[in-house]
Image (cartoon, rainbow, N blue to C red):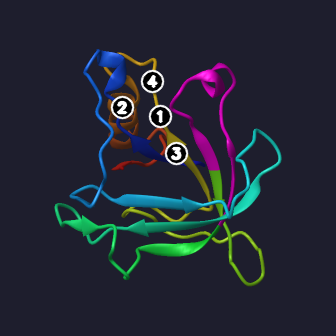
C-alpha cells in the first residue's frame, strides 16, 4: 500500500502567495536533488531525497545536518490531468543508494513502506477530503494509507 506525504497548498483559495526563502519550519522539510535531471512521467529517475524531521512540533532548519532520511529514491510525476497543474504530485520509491534495491522504511512516523506519494491536491476544496477520509479509514481499519504533512 502506498503511503501519502501530504503537501498543503493555499493558492487555490485565492490567498496571495509570496515567494520566500525557507529557513526553518515546524513541519518536516523535504529536499529532492535530481542531479540536474528532469522529473518525468515514466520512467522513474534516480534522485537523492533528504527529510529533516526532529519530531512533532520541533523546529527543522534547512541547514541541519542530521536527517530523518538521506538516501536515493526513484521519482516520477504522478497523476494524469494533475500533471498540467503548477503544483506537481510525485510517486517515489525509497532505494538503497549502494545496491539500488527497494528500501522499506518508516518515514515521518508512518509504517514501513517503499512506495510513497508526495500528494498535492490543488483542485480539492478545501483540501480536507483526503485527510478526512484517510483519518476515518484508519480509525475504522479499512486499509487507508498513512498521512502526514511536509513542506
* N-term-proximal mark, 2 vs 1: 2
The CA span between labels 2 and 1 is 7 Å
Callout 3 secondary element:
strand
Instruction: Tell me whether circle 2 and circle 3 mark residues in contact (CB < 8 Å).
Output: no
* Residue 85 lies in quadrant: top right
Residue placed most toward the observer, 104 or 33: 33
Which residue is at a point 81% across and 42% down the rendered structure image?
42
Instruction: Tell me whether circle 1 and circle 4 mark residues in contact (CB < 8 Å).
Output: yes
* Residue 127 lies in quadrant: top left
The CA span between labels 4 and 3 is 12 Å
Q: Position of residue 119 (x, y in %)?
A: 50, 39
Instruction: Tell me whether circle 2 and circle 1 mark residues in contact (CB < 8 Å).
Output: yes
Residue 9: assigned label: 2
Residue 120: assigned label: 1
Which residue is at a point 36% across and 64% down the rendered structure image?
109
**Residue projecting furthest to the right:** 43
Residue placed most toward the observer, 147 or 126: 126
- Does residue 89 belong to the magenta stretch? yes
Instruction: Tell me whether circle 4 and circle 2 mark residues in contact (CB < 8 Å).
Output: yes
* N-term-proximal mark, 2 vs 3: 2
* N-term-proximal mark, 4 vs 2: 2
* Residue 139 lies in quadrant: top left
Which residue is at a point 59% across and 48% down the rendered structure image?
2
The CA span between labels 2 and 3 is 12 Å
In the rendered image, the vertical position of residue 142 relative to residue 36, given as above or below: above
Callout 1 secondary element:
loop
- Please state the extent of the stretch shown in magenta in the rendering: 73-91
Q: Which residue is mark 4?
A: 122
The CA span between labels 4 and 2 is 6 Å
Which residue is at a point 35% across and 23% down the rendered structure image?
11
Amino acid at each position: 500500500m502506498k503511503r501519502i506525504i501530504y503537501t498543503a497548498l493555499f493558492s487555490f483559495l485565492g490567498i496571495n502567495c509570496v515567494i520566500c526563502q525557507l529557513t526553518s519550519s515546524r513541519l518536516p522539510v523535504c529536499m529532492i536533488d535530481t542531479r540536474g535531471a528532469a522529473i518525468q512521467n515514466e520512467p522513474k529517475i534516480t534522485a537523492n531525497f533528504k527529510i529533516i524531521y526532529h519530531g512533532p512540533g520541533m523546529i527543522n532548519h534547512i541547514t541541519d545536518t542530521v536527517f530523518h532520511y538521506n538516501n536515493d529514491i526513484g521519482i516520477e510525476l504522478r497523476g494524469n490531468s494533475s500533471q498540467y497543474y503548477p503544483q506537481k504530485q510525485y510517486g517515489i520509491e525509497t532505494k538503497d543508494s549502494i545496491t539500488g534495491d527497494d528500501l522499506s522504511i518508516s518515514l515521518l512516523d508512518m509504517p514501513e513502506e517503499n512506495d510513497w506519494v508526495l500528494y498535492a491536491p490543488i483542485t480539492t476544496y478545501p483540501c480536507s477530503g483526503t485527510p478526512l477520509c484517510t483519518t476515518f479509514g484508519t480509525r475504522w481499519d479499512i486499509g487507508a494509507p498513512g498521512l502526514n504533512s511536509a513542506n
